[in-house]
Image (spheres, rainbow, N blue to C red):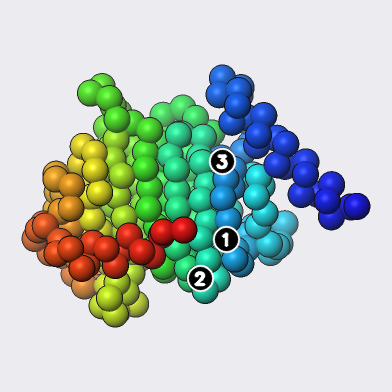
């Protein structure tokens, strides 16, 4: 009964938040787990423990997924994040949680992710307000759905690929060089730390499908 209660409480909290979109988040929560498959754990100052459906995520939380895992989270800034298998991802700051003007910042250490931001209107905030840092490059977006990750099609654990799936634009920056992705299906590759991003180009169907499979449920 105790285990049921531990699962049920956060799920009810999430359900109430979803159906009442105007409801406010608790001030210290960055988002909630909205979907999960297989093993995923969270690590923070309180320790390391399994993630569950409806569980809140906080600033500084390190999320790690196992083999064949998927995890979806809706963040306070409206972003929907999907993490693939064997991924390590950290929530650093969320617009409206850490500061009204600080934007949202995440870190990807390994694995793959897909992000769909809520900023899709013409007056969307600067792309600098939503970023993902990785060991080899920084990804910035505005009103966009994108995929990013390492070792796509066996490219190597330190090789980062990024593709814009739809929306307004993505940039990838490394060692002072920046590449813009402005069309759906356009991607770039950073072949390790200290390397500049490759030229933007439309991905072949096989590569695009391989990326999407890593975050498909």
Left or right of 96? Residue 19 is right
Vertical arrangement, residue 134 with respect to residue 170, above or below: below
Q: Secondary structure at mark 1?
A: strand
Q: Secondary structure at mark 2?
A: loop
Q: Residues within 10 Å of mark 2 (few under 14, many from 20)?
A: some
**What residue sits 34% from the left and 46% below the top?**
131
Q: CA distance from mark 1 to mark 3?
A: 18 Å
Of all residues, the one furthest to the right in this rendering is 1
Q: CA distance from mark 3 to mark 2?
A: 23 Å
Q: Secondary structure at mark 3?
A: strand
Vertical arrangement, residue 26 with respect to residue 115, above or below: above
Q: Which mark is residue 31?
A: 3
Q: Earlier in the sequence, mark 1 or mark 2?
A: 1
Say which quarter of the image contains residue 175. bottom left
**What residue sits 41% from the left and 67% below the top?**
111
Percent of width and height locating residue 130: 35, 41
* Residue for badge 1: 37
Q: CA distance from mark 1 to mark 2?
A: 8 Å
* Residue for badge 2: 68
Q: Earlier in the sequence, mark 3 or mark 2?
A: 3
CB within 8 Å, label 1 to label 2: yes
């Amino acid at each position: 009964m105790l285990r049921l209660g531990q699962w049920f409480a956060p799920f009810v909290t999430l359900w109430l938040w979803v159906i009442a979109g105007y409801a406010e988040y608790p001030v210290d929560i960055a988002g909630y787990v909205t979907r999960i498959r297989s093993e995923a754990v969270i690590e923070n100052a309180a320790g390391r423990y399994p993630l569950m459906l409806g569980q809140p995520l906080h600033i500084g939380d390190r999320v790690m997924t196992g083999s064949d895992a998927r995890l979806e989270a809706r963040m306070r800034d409206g972003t929907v994040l999907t993490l693939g298998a064997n991924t390590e991802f950290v929530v650093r700051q969320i617009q409206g949680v850490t500061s009204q003007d600080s934007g949202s910042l995440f870190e990807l250490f390994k694995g793959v992710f897909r992000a769909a931001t809520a900023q899709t209107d013409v007056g969307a905030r600067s792309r600098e307000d939503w970023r993902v840092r990785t060991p080899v490059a920084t990804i910035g977006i505005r009103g966009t759905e994108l995929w990013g990750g390492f070792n796509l099609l066996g490219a190597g654990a330190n090789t980062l690929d990024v593709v814009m799936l739809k929306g307004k634009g993505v940039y990838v920056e490394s060692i002072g060089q920046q590449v813009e992705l402005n069309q759906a299906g356009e991607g770039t590759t950073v072949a390790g730390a200290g390397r500049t991003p490759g030229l933007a180009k439309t991905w072949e169907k096989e590569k695009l499908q391989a990326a999407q499979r890593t975050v498909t449920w």
